Image: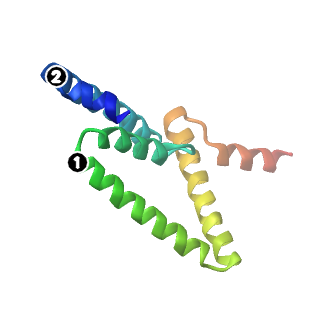
Amino acid sequence: MHTTLDLIRSNPTGRVTLKIFIAIAGAIVVTVGIALIPLPGPGWLLVIAGLGIWAVEYHWARRLLGFTRRHVQAWTRWVTSRSLPVRFGLGAVGLVFVAVVVWLSLKYSLGIDLVARVLHYLATH
């Protein structure tokens, strides 16, 4: 991979084309990831993948990716060093957060209020 990139970078036109391609591809992946962050799914994973794409060509992205990797590893070490009830509590908080985000997304983007529907169903049946 490095040999191919070095070959492309050896040509002035190839260098500019590579920079433009990397910038656009990274921007698309990061933008999709940011759009997916509030929804359950791989939002943060896509943002980090977009940073990885940018890191091929841009030093600032390489540094930011290293910073992110260090902090994610530190968070993972901290969580795994906690007791099982604390980890379950953190998981429960995460699930509640995702449920609230999904509920608010459905309510305000599609006009579907699941809580009101469930409460109405329980009251009538």
Q: Nearer the viewer, residue 124 or 5?
A: 5
**Mark closer to the observer (1, 2):** 2
| Count of numbered circles in the view | 2
**Horizontal side of residue 93 vs 71, given as left or right:** right
- Element class at badge 1: helix
Q: Furthest-top residue in view?
A: 13
Q: At numbered mark 2, what does the secondary structure look like: helix, strand or loop?
A: loop
101 vs 52, nearest the viewer:
52
Q: Quadrant of residue 81?
A: bottom right
- Image height of 122 relative to 32, above or below: below
Q: Residues within 10 Å of mark 2 (few under 14, many from 20)?
A: few
- Residue 105 position within the rendered picture, expressed as x and y whole percent measured from the top left: 52, 42
The foreground one among 1 and 109 is 1
Kind of residue at disc 1: His
**Crowding at mark 1 (Cα within 10 Å: few <14, some 14-19, many 20+):** few
| Residue 53 percent across, percent down from the top left | 35, 38
Question: Residues under labels 1 and 2: Cα distance?
Answer: 20 Å
Q: Amino acid at mark 2?
A: Asn
Point out residue 109 in the picture as x, y percentages from the top left corner: 49, 35
Tell whether label 2 touches label 1 (CB within 8 Å): no
In which quadrant of the rendered image does the N terminus lie? Answer: top left
Lower sequence index among marks 1 and 2: 2
Name the residue tied to disc 2. 11
Q: Pointer 1: what residue?
A: 59
